Amino acid sequence: MAYLKIFPIKVTDEKAIKYIMNPDKTDGSLLVSGYNCTPETAAVEFAMTREFAKNNGIEKGDNLAWHIVQSFKPGEITDPEEAHKIGIEFANQFLKGKYEYVLSTHTDKDHVHNHIIFCAASYVDYKKFNTNKRGYYNMCKISNRICREHGLSENMPKENRNTSYKEQMEYKKGTSWKAKLKFQVDKAIRSSISYDEFIMKMKQAGYEVRQGKYLAFKAEEQKHFTNVKTLGSYYTDEKIFERLEKNKHTVKAPKVVTPEVRLFIEISSFVQTENRVGFEKWAQRNNFQEAAKTFNYLSENNLLNYNDFTNHIEDVSNSIKATTEDLKQIEHDISDTQLLKKHCNNYRYCAEIIKKEPTDKKKESYIKKHKSEYDLFKHTQSELKKLDIAKIPTNKKLDAKLTDLENRQSVKFNELKALKKQEKELDVIKQNFQIMFSIKSLEQSEPEKDSKTIPR
């Protein structure tokens, strides 16, 4: 990435859109796309969205649209279509599907670059787009990540851009506190399957841990804590959890099954008799940390059979997948309904203009003046026909449908949140059980010193 710029359009967005759609710059207009708008009628669609926003009492700012230029290093991208796909991916993630935009890829210079012009008002909630310093760096963060995923360089500004030359040199040599911390965090994450295990391994490596609003570490010789968010986007709390989540699926199950089942029966016998005190004493003698969590979970969920336990884990995992799919479908339905509402508003708006068409000599000049509205009317008719809409639904009906979908989305989101919490608890139980199984196997391989240590 060579650079990324964003600036407002305050005078006319129509000229700006025509400029970025220039056939001489876009391989004969092949490298032009529109999101929830037709590039040829985008200016009038933007105008209508802004008008609806104004009617909803949102008049913040005087910008008509925003223009983003996403440029790549000379020679880094040889296929302009790849740059176009990257631009669409970036625009969709940055604008979150709330703003209409036109995107074009220019090939007329030694470096391929994308132009993205998007409406200043959202067609979803009619809120005006606003940006600041933090918003700009968030935009750069998204672009950098996408470039990394496509094997491209990332030279965009970052929030830690004021790093001193001395610290940059220390990073390259691997002698700075942050460089050492990065190395240790990566090492601990690679060998951990849960957040608790990761924290434990950081402590074992000699780091003091502070778990406040942000996770922070301090080496023995350091004077101050280092906040993980200062290490870069790959080390945020969210990213650490994401990396640990991937590790869970790479953990191999123990090859020996029978001793594992035997240990489970031994544990469940305490649960079945509700002998928590006996279980805790047994766990303490056998050096099983956090074993109480295992006892509580098995007891509360009545999991006293090993097959029930493994099936329970699979059920929770399948429920998460199913709920995630339901959420995706609801989000898709919300997006479709919002787009239908936009088409209906455009249809009514353009129909009113066409309805006022004069029948005298002024008819030709009137049609010429409102050419964009006539073109948009035909395009909207075509889109509604594709959706098999014979009668235009009212906004009241569409709003009611959106409210229902959003309520369902909220319910499903809470379900998913509860399931993920349960999955997290299960991760701890599985980890505890693996530790208990490992220690138990080790003890059984050694000469038995005290036969009374483990209750029979």
Image: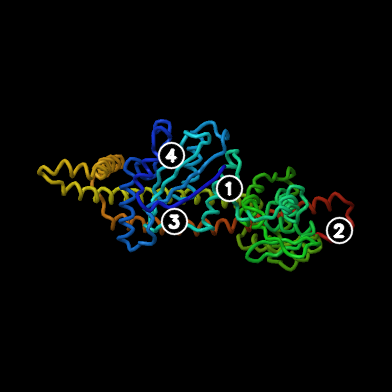
Camera-nearest label, 4 or 2: 4
**Residue in the foreground of this view, choosing between 350 and 131:** 131
- Name the residue nearer the viewer: 171 or 306: 171
Label 3: which residue? 409
Give the position of the C terminus as an image quadrant: bottom right
Q: Earlier in the sequence, mark 4 or mark 3?
A: 4
Q: Position of residue 214 (x, y in %)?
A: 64, 63
Q: Earlier in the sequence, mark 2 or mark 3?
A: 3
Pinpoint residue 344: horizontal percent, then vertical percent.
28, 49
Residue type beneath disc 2: Ser
The answer to whether the residue labelled 2 contacts the one labelled 1, judged by CB atoms less than 8 Å apart, is no
Give the amino acid type for the residue marked by disc 4 in the picture: Ser
Residue 308 appears anywhere in the view: no
Tell whether label 3 touches label 4 (CB within 8 Å). no
Q: Which residue is mark 4?
A: 104
Left or right side of 391 for 11 = right
**Residue plotted at (50% across, 50% down):** 324
Q: What is the spatial separation of the Cα atoms under label 2 and label 3, in whole angstroms?
A: 56 Å
Q: Residue furthest bottom?
A: 277
* Scheme of colours in the image: rainbow
Q: CA distance from mark 2 to mark 1?
A: 65 Å
Could you tell which of marks 2 and 1 lies nearer the N-terminus?
1
Q: Secondary structure at mark 1?
A: loop
3 or 1: tag closer to the N-terminus: 1
Q: Are marks 4 and 2 in contact (CB under 8 Å)?
A: no
Mark 4 or 3, closer to the camera: 4
Q: What kind of residue is marked 3?
A: Gln
x and y, in percent, of residue 232 in the image: 64, 53
